Each structure stands twice: as C-alpha cells, then as structure tokens.
Amino acid sequence: MALILIRTSPRKPKKGEVTKLSVVVRHPMEPGTRRDEEGNLIPAKYITELEVTLNGKRVAFVRPSRGVSANPLFAFKIKAEPGEVRVVYRDTSGETGEKTYTLKVAE
Amino acid sequence: MDRRKFLKGTGALLAVLGVGRGSWVRAQAGAQVPTVEDVQDLENLNKGLKEALGITFDRLEPSDQVRIGAPKIAESGANVPVEVVVDLPPAEVKGVHCFVDKNPFPHLFSTEFGTKAAESYFATRIRIAETAPIRIVVETQDGRFLLASHVTRVTVGGCG
C-alpha cells in the first residue's frame, strides 16, 4: 500500500490565505521501458489518475503518465479554509490509494 | 631588469590572463544550454500532441501568460522539478498539459483545476530522456492552446 503525504506551506495558514498544498505519493511510477539485471522489461506501473479535493470540492484532477518521476510530487494553490483535504489515486494495475488530511487555519 | 619593471610586467600579464580566462568561462557557460530550436523534435512532439489533444504544433500560440519554472541544467533527468504558473483564473483554464520533445512517450501529464484551486498553479517532477524542450500547453475554455517552452540540459537521462 502506497504511502501518501500531504502538507501545506505555511503549515498553519491564516483563513483565506493562498497556500501551497503538496502531495507526495510513494509509488515506483515504473515507465515500462526499464530492464532488470537479466535484461527483462520491468512491466509498466504508474499512476494514471489523482484527484485532490477540499471539503468535497475539487482542487485539481491530474492525469500523470510514465514521464512523471518515481515517488511523485504534485503541488497546487488553495485558499486556506478549515476542513478536510482528500487525495485519491489509481494506477495502471488498478491499485488505488487515498489519504485525508485535516487542514487547520489560524484565525 | 629592475624590480619595478618586473612587477609591472607580471602584473599586466596576469591582468590580461585573468580577463581572458573570465570571458572564456563565460562563453562556455553560455554555450551549455542550447536554444529551443537547437534541440526540438517537432515530429515526436506532434505524436504526443495528437495522442493527448488531437492537435499539432501549428495550433499552439506562444504566450507569456504561461510561465515555466525549471532548472537550466539537471544532473539527472529522472527527477526534474517543473512549476507552471498561468496568468489566467483557474475557471478560464480547461487543462494544463506537459510534453517533452525527445521523450519516448512525449506526453507527461495533464491537469485540470477545480473550483477550489486558488490560482492556476501546478508543480510536479518529471523525467527527461535527453536534453530537449519542456512544453507546457494550456488549453483555455475559449478553445485556444497557449504554449511556453523551456530547455533543460540533462547530463544523465531519466527514462532507462
């Protein structure tokens, strides 16, 4: 099961402040073009869909491909509001992952 | 030779060498990052554009409303940070698409913004197979395709 990290910068933004929201997924993003020591192709396995929502409404929908780095980072800009950030992804093998993060704001 | 003359002479010689050396280094640094035209591959780029968007390069309008933040030189092509800022509200942006001319799979990602995006901003890390332009294509809601290009020189490729 892949690990998803969610972080904001600043860590505790003021309400309404434009805030950078960073998501890192621990995922090999195997492009399907690499070979192992025996020269066999390593099958492709990469994230094809990733959705980020804030309090149930979409921040962004990303369709990465094999050209995105391993353990990919995705960053967005949101207006800080208290509530829940949710990240859901799906990869080429059908594996899915999700993570929620409670966003706290300074009044 | 008297001492004063000697010192003047070597001083002047060193100054000449110093200046010469400095401009040589600057010329080298200038030559390190090629221009877009030097390293583009429109045929391969068109392959990706057609597959992802159903268009070709001649549909793209170069625009300074699209800005790319990426290094000029990357030691490894496996992990190149790319930051995109579009000077349009997220509601006017239908999609942000990334291509690299010389990658075996030239389309890298597409991103759509939702109502909770505060700015048309997106950042990620990409693989670059060899020195080539990174292309950010911004599809607007009124059907235009804005283009920004940025060359990153890669010393070790990131696709194999």
Image (cartoon, grey):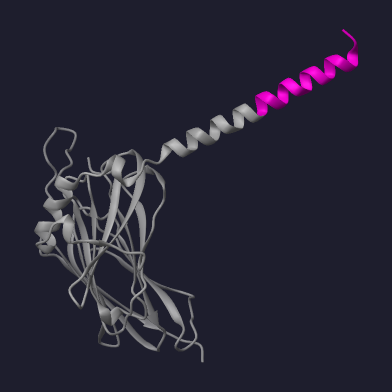
Q: Position of residue B47 (x, y in %)?
A: 11, 51
Taking A107 as reference, is A91 above or below it?
above
Return the x and y of residue B82 as percentages of the image width and height: 35, 58
The reply to whether residue A92 is in sight is: no
In this picture, is B5 found above or below B125?
above
Image location (x, y in percent) of residue A68: 25, 55
Name the residue: 22% across, 48% down: B101
Q: Where residue B102 sits in the image (x, y, percent)? A: 22, 44
Where is A53 relative to B49, above or below?
below
Q: Quadrant of residue A29?
A: bottom left
Residue at 23% in and 43% down: B159
Magenta stretch: residue B158 in it? Answer: no
Looking at the rendered image, the quarter that the C terminus of chain B falls into is top left
Is B3 inside the magenta-drawn segment?
yes
- Residue stretch in magenta: B1-18
Quadrant of residue B143 within the rendered picture: bottom left
Q: Nearer the viewer, residue A106 or B50?
A: B50
Instruction: Let me know if residue B101 appears in the view.
Output: yes
Q: Nearer the viewer, residue A65 or B111?
A: B111
Foreground residue, B58 or B81? B58
Q: Nearer the viewer, residue B9 or B76?
A: B9
Residue at the extreme bottom of the image, as rendered: A107
- The residue that appears at 25% across and 44% down in the rendered structure is B40
Count of numbered labels shown in the rendering: 0
Question: Which quarter of the figure is the N terminus of chain B placed in?
Answer: top right
Q: Quadrant of residue B121?
A: bottom left
Name the dominant secondary structure of the magenta segment: helix
